[in-house]
Amino acid sequence: MKKILLLLCFTSFLTLLFAQENEQEEESTSGFQKNKLFTGGDLTLSFYTGGTTVGVSPYFGYSITKWLDAAVSLNFIYRGQKDPYGNKARQTNIGPGAFVRLFPIDFLYVQAQYEHNFINYKYIPQGGSGTFKDKFDVNSLLLGAGYSSGRGGGSNTYYYLSVMFDVAQLPNSPYVDSYGRLVPIIRAGFNVGLFQGRSKRNRM
């Protein structure tokens, strides 16, 4: 809980700071602007001793300012583990999420993302007898930073690569190992700005 509160305070502080610095630079336009919409998706890869996590996460969002994006997402994640005794665990999950990306400069960003994952779990003892199945759900709060290539000049179409951690660190999270330790989450993907014709490159 302390980590979550610190994250929220930190994000709020950065948002207020950038808002003050850019207030005079923002255009006076108001209301919904379709050229600020974007979509995209990423691949999630995480490797650690005895385990692998692989996933895809499509999303759809809106650029609130030239330095702040927000989006909703849907996650599909597979996680497999094997202990030293040959016992195996398989976990698949699907769940909604939402994130904000804060760009202090065009090619670097920090990201905070909330996810609620519905999980199907299967435990297979060594030898295959006594298989156990279960269903549950768990929240995750991801925090990290990333690099974007191609963003700038009013364009919101770019490639990106990020590394994040589940700071909530709850049991059964797809982003912690069997000992509850944080696992780095590597995500790579493509962000596509919508309705951005040549005349709208400088939309903000």
Image: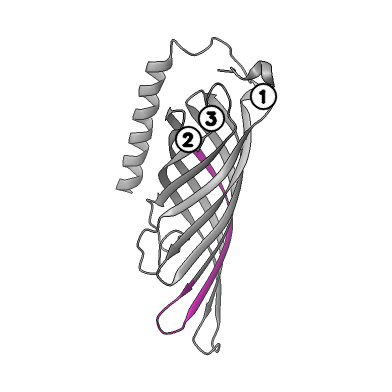
The residue depicted at 39 percent of the width and 22 percent of the height is: 18
- Crowd rating for badge 1 (residues with CA inside 10 Å; few <14, some 14–19, many 20+): many
Asked whether residue 144 is drawn in magenta, I would say: no
The residue depicted at 53 percent of the width and 42 percent of the height is: 98
What distance separates the C-alpha of mark 1 from that of mark 3? 13 Å
Q: Nearer the viewer, mark 1 or mark 3?
A: 3
Q: Amino acid at mark 2?
A: Arg
Q: Position of residue 158 (x, y in %)?
A: 57, 35
Q: Amino acid at mark 1?
A: Gln
Q: Amino acid at mark 3?
A: Arg
First along the sequence among labels 3 and 2: 2
The overriding secondary structure of the stretch rendered in magenta is strand
Q: Which residue is mark 3?
A: 151
Q: Position of residue 178 (x, y in %)?
A: 40, 69
In the picture, residue 172 is in which quadrant? bottom left
First along the sequence among labels 1 and 2: 2
| Helix, strand or loop for disc 2 | strand
| Helix, strand or loop for disc 1 | loop
Q: Which residue is mark 2?
A: 101
The residue depicted at 46 percent of the width and 69 percent of the height is: 51
- Give the magenta range: 81-100
Q: Nearer the viewer, mark 1 or mark 2?
A: 1
Q: Which residue is mark 1?
A: 196
Q: Position of residue 150 (x, y in %)?
A: 54, 32
What distance separates the C-alpha of mark 3 from that of mark 2? 13 Å
